[in-house]
Image: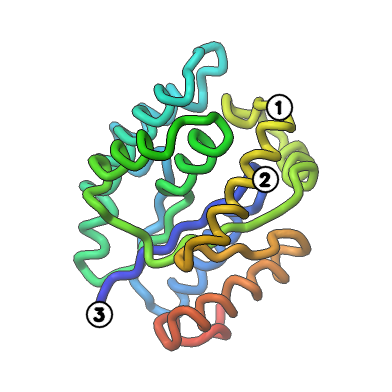
Amino acid sequence: MKGCFLVFEGPEGAGKSLQIARLAARLSASGVPHTVTREPGGTAAAEAIRSVLLDRPELHLDGVAEVLLFSASRRVHVDEVIRPVLGRGEVVLSDRFELSTRVYQGWARGVPPETIEQVTRAATGGLVPDLYIVLDVPVMVGTDRREAHGGRPDRIEREAEVFMERVREGYRELAAGEDGIAILDGSGTPDEVEARILALLEERFPGRFRGANFPL
C-alpha cells in the first residue's frame, strides 16, 4: 500500500500535538503502521537546530535566517525519517512541515514566496504531504490554552498578538487556494475536534484508515 503523509498545522495553541497523539493511538489500536514526528526535529541534527530556533529567545534571527534553519532541519528530516517510512507504505503523522514556513516566515515575517519556494524545493526534493490538516482557533483561545499548560513560551510563541493574527490569516488564505490544505475548527472539546478530523480523513481517504469510527 502507498504510504500516506499527513501533516497537522495551525497557530500556537491550536491543539496539534494532542490530536496527533489521539490519532496515533487509534492507528495503533487498528494495527496501522505509522510514525509520529515533528518539525523542527525528528532527527538528532534536526533537534539540535530546533534548540537554536525555539529555545534561545535571546538570539536575533530574521525571517530569512529562520527559513534557512528550518529548511536545513527539514532536509535531514525528509531524508532520514519521512521518505523511509513512506517507502515502506506506512503513515507519517508530522507536527508541522513546509506550510509552517510559508505562513510564519512568508506571510507573517514577509520573506518573499519565491525565496521560500526555492529553498524548500532543495530541502524536500519536491515531497508534498497528502494532506495538511490545519486546526484553526482564535489567537486568544490558543494563548489561553498554552498558558493553561504552563511552561515557558518558546522564541516564536513570544511574538506579539499582531504577529499571531497574521499567522492565522496566512493559514486561512493559503487554504483557500490549495486543495491539499484543509481548515478545521480547532475550538471545542478534544473529542469534538477529533470527530472533525476523523470525518475529514474518511472523506479524503475512504477506507484508508478503516473508517472514521475505528475503535480505540
Q: Is residue 159 above or below residue 146?
A: above
Q: Which residue is depicted at the point 64% across and 65% down? A: 184
Mark 2 vs 1, N-terminal side: 2
Q: Look at the image and tell me whether residue 94 can be seen.
A: yes
How many numbered circles are shown? 3
Q: Amino acid at mark 2?
A: Gly
Mark 1 vs 3, N-terminal side: 3
Q: Which residue is depicted at the point 37% across and 61% down? A: 129
Side of 215 relative to 5 (left or right): right
The span from disc 2 to disc 1 (Cα, nearest Å) is 14 Å
Q: Quadrant of the N terminus?
A: bottom left
Side of 119 relative to 155 (left or right): left
Whether pointer 2 and pointer 1 mark residues with C-beta atoms closer than 8 Å, the reply is no
Question: SS class of the residue under badge 2?
Answer: loop
Question: SS class of the residue under badge 1?
Answer: loop
The image's mark for residue 160 is 1
The span from disc 1 to disc 3 (Cα, nearest Å) is 45 Å
